Image (cartoon, rainbow, N blue to C red):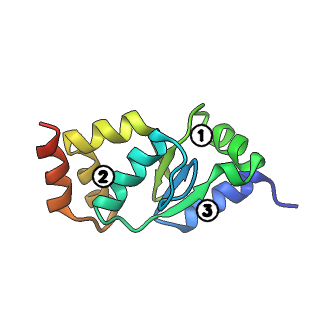
Amino acid sequence: MTTAVDQIRDTVTTNDVVLYMKGTKMMPQCGFSSRVAGVLNFMGVDYVDVNVLADADIRQGIKDFSEWPTIPQLYVKGEFVGGCDIVTEMTLSGELDQLFEAKGITYNKDAADQIRAANA
């Protein structure tokens, strides 16, 4: 029998970018999830969204898996990146661009620059 942690491990290792969130990329159900999904959507990142509200085992399992208490949680190439505050800071500093480039993730550099310009 597959556990929630096994499912999570499989999802983050078989997909380049995964966002565990409340709701979906097209209909986020909380402000923090909306912010991270909005950044990824605006930057044109191809990612898998996992709605933790649809499965209580996954909702608790992702917290156990990452040893991180909050949602959303972003994973890139199997590596836990962080939640809303960390992703926001990385976006504004350019670190998220660097991570995507280092991991071979396609994104729209102009869109990332627009986010930074709008928040300068």
Q: Earlier in the sequence, mark 1 or mark 2?
A: 1
Q: Earlier in the sequence, mark 2 or mark 3?
A: 3
Tell me if 86 is positioned left or right of 102 in this view: right
Q: Are marks 3 and 1 in contact (CB under 8 Å)?
A: no
Q: Which residue is mark 1?
A: 66
Q: Residue at x 71, y 49 (%)?
A: 58
**Looking at the image, is 50 positioned above or below residue 63?**
below
**Looking at the image, is 113 positioned above or below residue 45?**
above
Disc 2: CA contacts within 10 A as few (<14), some (14-19) or many (>=20): some
Report x, y in % for residue 78.
51, 56
Tell me if 84 is positioned left or right of 59 in this view: left
Disc 3: CA contacts within 10 A as few (<14), some (14-19) or many (>=20): some
Report x, y in % for residue 96.
29, 48
Q: Nearer the viewer, residue 33 or 91?
A: 33
Q: Which residue is mark 2?
A: 99
Q: Nearer the viewer, residue 41 or 27?
A: 27
Report x, y in % for residue 47.
45, 64
Tell me if 46 is positioned left or right of 114 in this view: right
Q: Residue at x 17, y 38 (%)?
A: 119
Q: Earlier in the sequence, mark 3 or mark 1?
A: 3
Q: Quadrant of the N terminus?
A: bottom right
Q: Which residue is mark 3?
A: 11
- The answer for how far apart the CA atoms under marks 2 and 3 are is 19 Å
Give the amino acid type for the residue marked by disc 2 in the picture.
Answer: Leu
